[in-house]
């Protein structure tokens, strides 16, 4: 029996600042019906960034959704029509001031496919040694945090950096021999 | 300057089937204001499950949010008041029919802390060799998919299983010498 779910009706329940919420009636493979609430998100980009000296550059920010400071790889949302590569170059420069010298795609991740369509495109970024000045959005506060190789490996392994995209980027970089 | 964001006002914009959406006005450390839309989710559990013979047991289901079939570790939502360990035992039995013989906590993951409070508690599960019958919700269709060790390692490394929690669970299990 097919797993496919056919959309019968779809309505927008909410237009938020960074996402839209949609409700669908669906028909399952056996003819029965279900309801699906879906968060529609433009999608994100993230990069595990390394300076020429081998130091990893991450960022710390307060994430109101989880009500705590979270240390993560540099990441952000794509702008409409923006390619993932362009989005991550922009985000790296905005959040850290470092320029991207080389970008290697690592893969993609579904953030939580049970209810959101968010896909994060992940990269390994080789960045400039010295940062310029960063340029944050008016309501964005970000601190740059540097890790040695041993520090980052330990922090990831000990689950001290519980952000999913950060762990995924590190894992994919390891699998490619880049971390 | 503190990164902390103080909640000034909070209102529920939407009560969905599996999440609630909240809008907050916040005050940043420098006194300026921002708006935050937050998905409130009860939180999830997931387990990288292995049979005594070494075969990995994952599941495939159609995820309407991303409109495709996704192969993932067994996972689900916690019920109100339910401990993560109880939730994952229930989910493993419901989705695969296998009983849990031993459960090892791997850590936790924030699904996408920019806009959702969802935390997934991850486990390594040693499960029974033979499945009983599964018991799915009325609008849930799940197929069990088995992987050899080499197949799973390759599929993760090649980014063929792009579900974030699946990649995170595998990475954390590897770091603990369990995979």
Image (cartoon, coloured by chain):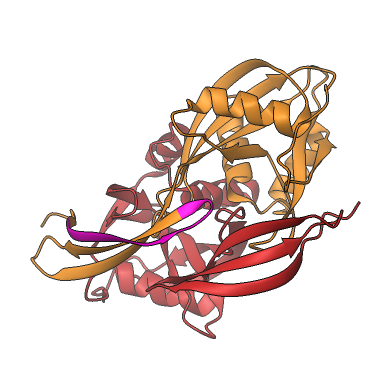
Chain colours: A red, B orange
Name which quarter of the figure residue B98 lies in: top right
The answer to which of A24 and B175 lies nearer the viewer is A24
Horizontal side of residue A160 vs A113, given as left or right: left
**Above/below status of A12 relative to B104:** below
* Residue A155 shown left or right of residue B95 in the figure: left
Magenta region, residue range? B7-19
Count of all numbered marks drawn on residues in the image: 0
Residue drawn at point x = 49 percent, y = 57 percent: B16
Verify whether residue B143 appears in magenta. no
Q: Residue at x 69, y 29 (%)?
A: B92
B70 and A105: which one is in front? B70
Q: Residue at x 78, y 22 (%)?
A: B51
Percent x, y of residue B122: 54, 33
> In this view of the protein, which residue sits in the foreground, B25 or A7?
A7
Quarter that holds the N terminus of chain B: bottom left
Along the viewing direction, whichever of B94 and A91 lies nearer the viewer: B94
Tell me the chief SS of the magenta region.
strand
Q: Report which quarter residue B167 is drawn in.
A: top right
Point out the residue furthest to the left here.
B31
- Quadrant (top left, top right, bottom left, bottom right) of the C terminus of chain B: top right
Classify residue B2 as left or right of residue A144. Answer: left
Rendering coords of residue B80 (x, y %):
46, 34
Residue A154 figure quarter: top left
Q: Quick check: can you spot residue B134?
A: yes
- The residue located at (68%, 61%) in the rendering is B64
Tell me if residue B10 is in the magenta stretch: yes
């Amino acid at each position: 029996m097919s797993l496919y779910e056919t959309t019968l009706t779809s309505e927008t329940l909410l237009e938020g600042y960074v996402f839209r919420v949609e409700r669908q009636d669906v028909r399952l493979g056996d003819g029965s019906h279900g309801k699906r609430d879906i968060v529609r998100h433009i999608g994100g980009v993230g990069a595990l960034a390394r300076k020429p000296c081998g130091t990893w550059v991450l960022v710390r920010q307060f994430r109101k959704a989880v009500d705590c400071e979270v240390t993560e790889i540099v990441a952000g949302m794509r702008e409409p029509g923006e390619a993932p590569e362009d989005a991550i170059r922009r985000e790296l420069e905005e959040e850290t001031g470092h320029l991207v010298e080389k970008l290697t795609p690592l893969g993609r991740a579904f953030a939580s496919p049970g209810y959101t369509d968010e896909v994060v495109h992940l990269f390994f970024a080789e960045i400039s040694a010295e940062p310029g000045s960063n340029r944050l959005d008016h309501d964005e506060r970000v601190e740059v945090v540097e890790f040695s190789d041993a520090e980052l490996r330990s922090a990831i392994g000990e689950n001290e950096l519980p952000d999913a995209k950060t762990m995924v980027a590190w894992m994919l970089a390891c699998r490619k021999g880049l971390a």
